[in-house]
Image (cartoon, rainbow, N blue to C red):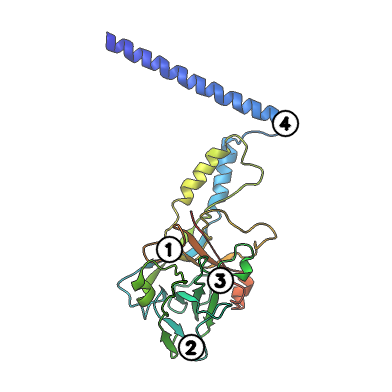
Amino acid sequence: MWSDLRRLWQELIDELRAASEEAKAEYVLRKWEIDNPGRKAVTEEEADAIVDWFCSLTRPALILRPDPAVSVVDTAARIGGPAWLADDEQWPLDGAGGRLEFVAQLDFARLPRLEGFPDSGVLRFFVGRDELFGANWDAPEKSGCCILWHAGPATGGRLEAPHSLTPDDISPFQSETVRAVGQALSATPADTWHVAVRLAGQDDRPGMAEVDDRIFEISEEREPGHRIGGHPVFVQTDFRRPGYYDDYDVVLLGLTSDSAIMWGDVGEATFLIRQADLDRRNFSRVVFHWDCH
């Protein structure tokens, strides 16, 4: 008998709590509509349409993951290790004459074909050795990075080992072994989500928080790892906006943080390029950006 009464009492409490929450939500909604004449809450149909639109924003990419079964010398993609330099190339220097830090190499003749990218040629990526790794957040086009492009295969030339770091130098490499020897990466084709979507003027609408939650869940399903193509990954916010670097729409290379390489506090680094520059194989205006937690 007492157990039945306790159960009935609990059911009554639950019903009252649910009714209270529903009334509170209704009050908040009506007050928002009064304070915002002419605007309405997000309907279920509109929410579904927004999520469907978000899902249509996927872009093809190559996800790069460590592959110990592949030789560092023969791999299509790698981070760290000796930098391959053609006979007419020299190790890039920063504005003060110091050596930049070699971080990655891509051999497109050995990579799976990716629309809009070269099908041959070799790219080498170098960043600064200062505490910002050469990034310039105020003027991204002045980032202290260097991209070396060689149109032919990586034959001839020489492999040049990274030079020792001075006490003032900072490298993104967590692993001294990867920095010195390199780490081979295997490439897997994948579609990537846009990590964050901001709908101007919509954030305050009732129901929009639930839409954001659905989009976040989809975004979290994105393939982890370094990447070529796809959408850039920003830990904080996308620094691009209309009229401000929004034409830098191609991820030439994205480097995540892991046990081998680390961008600040588990950050993400991205080399961005205009599609028109990529088509012309002009890598002199690549923007290097990274951010972290």
* In the rendered image, the vertical position of residue 48 relative to residue 282, given as above or below: above
Residue 44, image x, y percentages: 56, 36
Q: Can you give x and y, in whole percent of width and height, for residue 282 in the image?
A: 61, 78
Residues tagged 4 and 3 counted as in contact (Cβ below 8 A): no
Residue 220 shown left or right of residue 147 in the figure: left
Marks 1 and 3: which is nearer the front? 1
**How far, Cα to Cα, is label 4 from label 3?**
46 Å
Residue shown at the point (32%, 13%) measured from the top left: 6
- The residue where tag 3 is placed is 116
Furthest residue in direction top, as rendered: 1
- Mark sitting earlier along the chain (4/1): 4
Q: Which of the two discs, 2 and 3, sits closer to the camera?
A: 2
Return the residue at label 4. Answer: 37
| Residue placed most toward the observer, 178 or 27 | 178
Three-letter code, disc 3? Gly
Label 4: state its secondary structure.
loop
Which image quarter: residue 189? bottom left
Is the residue under label 3 in contact with that under label 2 (CB below 8 Å)? no
Q: Which residue is mark 1?
A: 262
Query: Which of the marked residues, 1 or 3, is nearer the chain's N terminus?
Result: 3
* Amino acid carrying mark 4 in the image: Pro
Nearer to the camera, 80 or 194: 80
Whether residue 179 is situated above or below residue 225 in the rendered picture: below
**Label 1 environment density (alpha carbons within 10 Å; few <14, some 14–19, many ≥20):** many
> Rounded to the nearest whole Å, what is the CA distance between mark 2 and mark 1?
28 Å
**What residue is pinned by disc 2?**
86
